[in-house]
Image (spheres, rainbow, N blue to C red):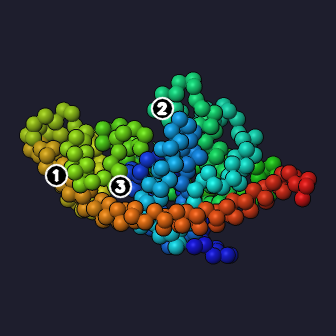
Amino acid sequence: MPVANDKRPVILTGDRTTGPLHLGHYAGSLKNRVRLQSTHQQFLLLADAQALTDNAREPDRVRRNVLEVALDYLAVGIDPTVTTICVQSALPALAELTLLYLNFVTVARLERNPTIKDEIQMRGFGRDIPAGFLCYPVAQAADITGFKATIVPVGEDQAPLIEQTNEIVRRLNHQIGRDVLLEARALIPDIGRLPGVDGKSKMSKSQGNAIPLSASSDQIRDAVRRMYTDPDHLRAADPGKVEGNVVFTYLDAFDQDPLGVEDLKARYRRGGLGDVVVKRRLEKVLQTLLAPIRERRERLSRDPGFIIEVLRKGTSEARERTQATLDELRGALGLSVLQ
Ligand code: ATP
Ligand code: MG
């Protein structure tokens, strides 16, 4: 747990509670979070309020997945005695910060945000964009700054959102005349974004192209079997393409033996190596990675009371911290007539 006067750099990241976490989360950011938790002061946000911005008709799904994502955190090795896990909707200061920040960003700027543009298209909103969805980058700015975080480990798709956060920070600090809020830096792993098993640009909970961290060994086997490879590689003897071939992308991300993977790539390019062989190797890699996570998850899921206790404690700490930022900002903006 964070201690008073903790001087370690502060990390904040979150996950929308739209479904259990998947390999994209693991490669894209969870691995970093597990690694950094011992040297940094880390807060993990279960972003149920943000999940509602495009799931307003499925509040049940959003609520159910709060526990699922929390379980995923603990199963991959997030230690609740050093990392604070909290629930976004139970932190009213974040909603109030969002409201203040909305005055420091224009609708045109939000519409130009490349992440938002991509996501609007992916979700097929057309012109009917929920206002909450368009504004979620502002809420994300409130999350990051509310915790006074300076490091945000995220997938590559989130980089424009951190830029947007820093713009808001600069505007507010300029308005106030001193640095009340801190700018943050995105920590993006080399892998960038992990594609979906269907070859689409991003593995995503909402797109049905994910391998969840909780996948059974049968699910892993089936997903690898159906995985997108090189559509022109019809016979094993033919030369194959490695670029855009999801099986190789996953081997790059998860295989512990990169030289072995390079060798395999060369043989595939040359011709004479069938998809089945490459897939067999990937299946083994994924089974080995996910089996212990799945077992830990199963064990933890038998004690939901423990998870709720972790969330209760983390959220109460987070409430104090975010309220302090809100009080400071309100004071700085002069919204303090009654104090
Ligand atoms: P949704 O489809 O509901 O938006 P998601 O799968 O995109 O869900 P988020 O909760 O939006 O997941 O993202 C949480 C974090 O995981 C973010 O930092 C995001 O960049 C990262 N992430 C999600 N998917 C991937 C991926 N395929 N590759 C790399 N990072 C990812
Ligand atoms: Mg997302």
Q: Name the residue beneath numbered marker 1.
A: 280
Residue 325 picture location, percent across and down: 73, 59
Along the horizontal axis of the image, is 254 left or right of 78?
Answer: left
In the picture, residue 30 is in which quadrant?
Answer: bottom left
The quarter of the picture where the N terminus appears is: bottom right
**Identity of the amino acid at label 1?**
Arg
Alpha carbons under labels 2 and 1: distance apart: 34 Å
Q: Can residue 219 be seen in this view?
A: yes
116 or 289, nearer to the observer:
289
Q: What element carries label 1?
A: helix
Q: Name the residue under label 3.
A: 213
Q: Is the residue marked by circle 1 packed among few (<14), some (14-19), or many (20+) residues within 10 Å?
A: few
Q: Is residue 199 above or below residue 184?
A: above
Type of the residue with mark 3:
Leu
State whether residue 191 appears in this view: no
Q: Earlier along the polypeptide chain: callout 1 or callout 3? A: 3
Q: Which residue position holds label 2?
A: 123
Q: Position of residue 119 (x, y in %)?
A: 50, 35
